[in-house]
Amino acid sequence: MRKTSTATAFLAGSLLLSACGSSATESSTSTTDATAAAPQTVTIYSGRNEALVGPLLSQVESATGTKIDVRYGDSSALAAQLLEEGDRSPADVFFSQDAGALGALAKAGRLSTLDSSTTGAVLKGYADANGSWVATSARARVVAYDPASAPEAETFTSIDAILDPKYKGKIGFAPTNASFHSFVTALRVTKGEAGAKDWLTKFKANSPQAYEKNGAVLAAVDSGEVSLGLINHYYWHELVAEKGADAVNAKIRFLNADDPGALINVAGVGVLKSSDTQDAAAKVVAYLTSKPSQQYFADETAEYPVVAGVTTDKHDLPDLASLTSAGIDLGQLDSLEATLGMLDEVGLT
């Protein structure tokens, strides 16, 4: 993945001027104008799936006049890669599936401070307190359930309910998914290190079934392959939009309680300090918090907008303000390394 740096553009312009001669004023002016008009390339490391955000990033290109290159992958893995690459990274923007991966980079000092007009555009609590990242959309953790084999899930108010031995071998989860990692971090924040490890140990003893992605977890619940699944809410709403409510067997339970299983997390973006296209990258980030982008998230991905005044009639979502969630500051989700270490220790990776 390559990007044209300002230094490279300047060097190319200088060589062209030398070839034309110092007296060719009109020609040099034309060349300089052409170089200035050429769009900069912003490289995005995206933990968001291409099918979800690819069309939006095409809109961003058109709206900002910026060329965008994207490297897709898992948010946690990309965050680790960015930390390893350091100042050598070709990335300009990190588009994360969750706040935890963003927080890990901010904690390591890898992110620039965003303009207050960008962080101030979103609802309170949906931007980093120090301006290192800003949310682009919000999502709630839910329990997907098969009403035939686990009808009682309709009344769950705590994630502890899934530890019941009667669900042994009947729970689906995505162990490498960044949203699951943030849920585990929320466990650590609310229950402490010992309490979180105890919960994970009991969860593992229940022989949960591992799937690669949340969509596969939901599909397994919908088919009756498992009784319960740990996912984000929007996967279910997307499935309903695709197949119709009558064709979807699975249902979802918003725990609607101060519980780590009711975590309302965000997808978000930050600009890498090592980027040599800071201004162009900042424009990309700002556009992702604009109303057209927020409308895209509301309509196309069934996520919650993080800017006031944006609604949708395409999905029957409970109002975000009506949900009781885990009382966790999203900035507390930044200890990704410790979470991954605990999952590895327990044997859930």
Image (cartoon, grey):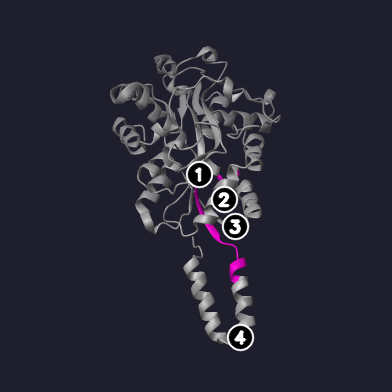
**Disc with the residue nearer the chain's start (3 vs 4):** 4
Q: Which residue is mark 1?
A: 269
As drawn, the label of residue 284 is 2
Question: 200 and 300: which one is in front?
Answer: 300
The spot of residue 102 in percent (x, y) is 43, 41
Distance from disc 4 to disc 2, alpha carbons, whole Å, reads 37 Å
Q: Amino acid at mark 3?
A: Thr
Nearer mark to the viewer, of 4 and 2: 4
Foreground mark, 3 or 4, reads 4
Mark 2 in CB contact with mark 3 (< 8 angstroms): yes
Q: Earlier in the sequence, mark 2 or mark 1?
A: 1
Where's residue 129, x and y in %? 44, 36
Q: Are marks 3 and 4 in contact (CB under 8 Å)?
A: no
Which residue carries the number 3 mark?
A: 66
Tags 2 and 1 in contact by the CB under 8 Å rule?
Answer: yes
**Whether residue 55 is visible:** yes
Earlier along the polypeptide chain: callout 4 or callout 2?
4
Judged from the image, the secondary structure of the residue bearing numbered disc 1 is strand
Mark 4 sits on what residue? 24
